[in-house]
Image: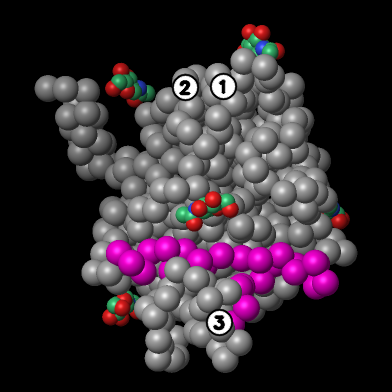
């Protein structure tokens, strides 16, 4: 019997005594606190519509005639079926998905002539895609497991998909799409509470969803948070970004299913720099090594320049992104952080000749969940747990579990859902 099979057996035996036996479940099912889910990067569906302003030649040259006569809303992200049927759409859709920065508005927006909207806000039905693989990475199994303990879509289970291209901006700077998302989320949380006897909600997030939820909470009045948020379960999110996000990739790859392969497109997103290693957490340790020079988290502006980002883009990292990541702090509502560890995670990228568009010559691995470094997870204790504003804080590290495994491996899912049930039972 190999290790995995043994582990499975242990789990099967353990599950016989798992706390949610049918009897106790039926009892809690009536008065479960509503759950609102925020999925990770790339999980929300986006529809697009072309307006009269749309000029393929300038807005999206690679679309050619592919969009001739296209009226009304269509699925821009993620429509694997369309891209598989017609690979010529890949560069076209990638261009439609691009963001531009409008210096007059001081904000990001779609390319001229393209309107977008998030699909199925309020529900969990819009997560994932027609790609079964990304269903797993986008809370599909978590939704099933929550339904297994009595949660019901639209009754006490809600979803807050968001346009993952946009990020929060510091106070005083425009971020209109993100601000709209915060307003919608506020309304959704209040509605979820109202539908459930005014009980406060439990927020459960994965990956980038956790950063958004934390920004949401830190921008909501404390009295509102205490009234409407019972617990915040933040899954697969560190306090200081990850080294792996320093791989901006080659701008020539174009696999339709991998969001990161739309390299020029993802480089244009406001979120392109959101989870870069934070100097607060990674300090002066070299995270990128070349023959001529080492880069630490403090040298990211230089590193971005060496990766071909413009002065404007580098300035936005410094003035828009960094202040938000450095401000990552306690949400001041009861919180459980859950992360996987024990999976080799890039800790240092070696590009000996400084050719950052190529594959790294060497990747030095450390502990983490495959994406997030352990340093970023441990920093949660210092940045949130140790904050006097934070009354209840718990950090769970699940061994041998990857970034996505935390919301898809049955062992980890049971731990996660158990935390949701624990939060339901908590008196305060
Ligand atoms: C995906 O694209 C195909 C082909 O263009 C279209 O028939 C289908 O309706 C799209 N899927 C969704 C969910 O809109
Ligand atoms: C940082 O957070 C504090 C408290 O939540 C807030 O008042 C301040 O405006 C934030 N600053 C930035 C740059 O986000
Ligand atoms: C990405 O942008 C670079 C620089 O502007 C350009 O040379 C390259 O062709 C673009 N790649 C794609 C796939 O559009
Ligand atoms: C870069 O850091 C490594 C340790 O990771 C060190 O051995 C090397 O001397 C440094 N190189 C330069 C150019 O500073
Ligand atoms: C993690 O996996 C390794 C290799 O499969 C195994 O040796 C180890 O016991 C596992 N650790 C835990 C805590 O499950």
Residue 192 within the magenta-colored segment of the rendering: no
Asked if 153 appears above or below 42 in the picture, the reply is below
Residue displayed at 74% across by 34% down? 302
Query: What residue does disc 1 label?
Result: 353
Q: Magenta stretch?
A: 87-113
Q: In the image shown, does 220 or 314 lie closer to the viewer?
A: 314
Mark 3–mark 2 Cα distance, whole angstroms, equals: 41 Å
Residue 208 picture location, percent across and down: 56, 52
Q: Name the image quarter holding residue 190.
A: bottom right
Label 1 CB sits under 8 Å from any ligand 4 atom: no
Q: Secondary structure at mark 2?
A: loop
Q: Nearer the viewer, residue 373 or 273?
A: 273
> In what element is the residue under mark 3?
loop
Q: Which residue is mark 2?
A: 361
Say whether disc 1 or disc 2 marks the residue closer to the N-terminus.
1
Q: Which residue is mark 3?
A: 55
Q: Earlier in the sequence, mark 3 or mark 2?
A: 3
Foreground mark, 3 or 2, reads: 3
Local crowd size for mark 2, using a 10 Å CA cut-off: few (<14), some (14–19), many (≥20): some
Task: Give the structural element (helix, strand or loop) at label 1.
Answer: loop
Q: Residues within 10 Å of mark 1 (few under 14, many from 20)?
A: some
Residue extending furthest right?
A: 172
Which of the two labelled residues, at mark 1 and mark 3, occupies the earlier sequence position? 3
Q: Is residue 357 left or right of residue 391?
A: left
């Amino acid at each position: 019997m190999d290790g995995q099979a043994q582990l499975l057996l242990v789990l099967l035996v353990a599950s016989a005594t798992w706390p949610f036996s049918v009897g106790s479940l039926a009892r809690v099912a009536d008065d479960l606190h509503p759950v609102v889910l925020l999925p990770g990067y790339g999980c929300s569906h986006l529809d697009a519509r072309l307006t009269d302003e749309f000029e393929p030649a300038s807005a999206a040259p690679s679309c050619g005639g592919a969009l001739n006569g296209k009226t009304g809303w269509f699925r821009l992200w993620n429509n694997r079926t369309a891209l598989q049927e017609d690979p010529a759409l890949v560069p076209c859709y990638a261009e439609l998905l691009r963001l531009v920065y409008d210096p007059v508005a001081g904000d990001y927006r779609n390319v001229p002539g393209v309107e977008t909207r998030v699909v199925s806000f309020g529900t969990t039905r819009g997560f994932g895609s027609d790609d079964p693989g990304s269903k797993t990475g986008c809370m599909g199994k978590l939704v099933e497991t929550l339904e297994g303990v009595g949660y019901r879509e639209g009754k006490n289970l809600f979803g807050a998909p968001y346009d993952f291209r946009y990020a929060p901006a510091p106070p005083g700077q425009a971020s209109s799409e993100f601000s709209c998302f915060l307003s919608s989320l506020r309304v959704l949380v209040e509605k979820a509470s109202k539908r459930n006897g005014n009980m406060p909600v439990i927020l459960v997030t994965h990956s980038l969803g956790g950063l958004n939820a934390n920004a949401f909470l830190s921008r909501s009045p404390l009295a509102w948070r205490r009234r409407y948020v019972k617990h915040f379960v933040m899954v697969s999110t560190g306090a200081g970004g990850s080294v792996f996000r320093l791989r901006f990739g080659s701008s020539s790859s174009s696999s339709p299913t991998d969001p990161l392969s739309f390299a020029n497109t993802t480089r244009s997103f406001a979120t392109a720099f959101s989870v870069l290693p934070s100097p607060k957490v990674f300090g002066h340790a070299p995270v990128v090594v070349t023959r001529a020079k080492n880069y630490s988290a403090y040298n990211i502006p230089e590193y971005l320049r060496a990766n071909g980002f413009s002065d404007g883009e580098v300035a936005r990292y410094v003035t828009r992104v960094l202040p938000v990541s450095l401000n990552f702090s306690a949400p001041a509502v009861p919180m459980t952080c859950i992360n996987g560890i024990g999976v080799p995670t890039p800790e240092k990228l070696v590009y000996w000749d400084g050719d950052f568009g190529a594959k790294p010559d060497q990747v030095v691995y450390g502990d983490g969940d495959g994406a997030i470094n352990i340093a970023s997870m441990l920093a949660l204790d210092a940045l949130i747990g140790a904050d006097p504003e934070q009354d209840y804080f718990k950090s769970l590290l699940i061994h041998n579990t990857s970034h996505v495994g935390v919301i898809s491996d049955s062992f980890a899912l049971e731990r996660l859902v158990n935390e949701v049930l624990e939060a339901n039972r908590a008196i305060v």
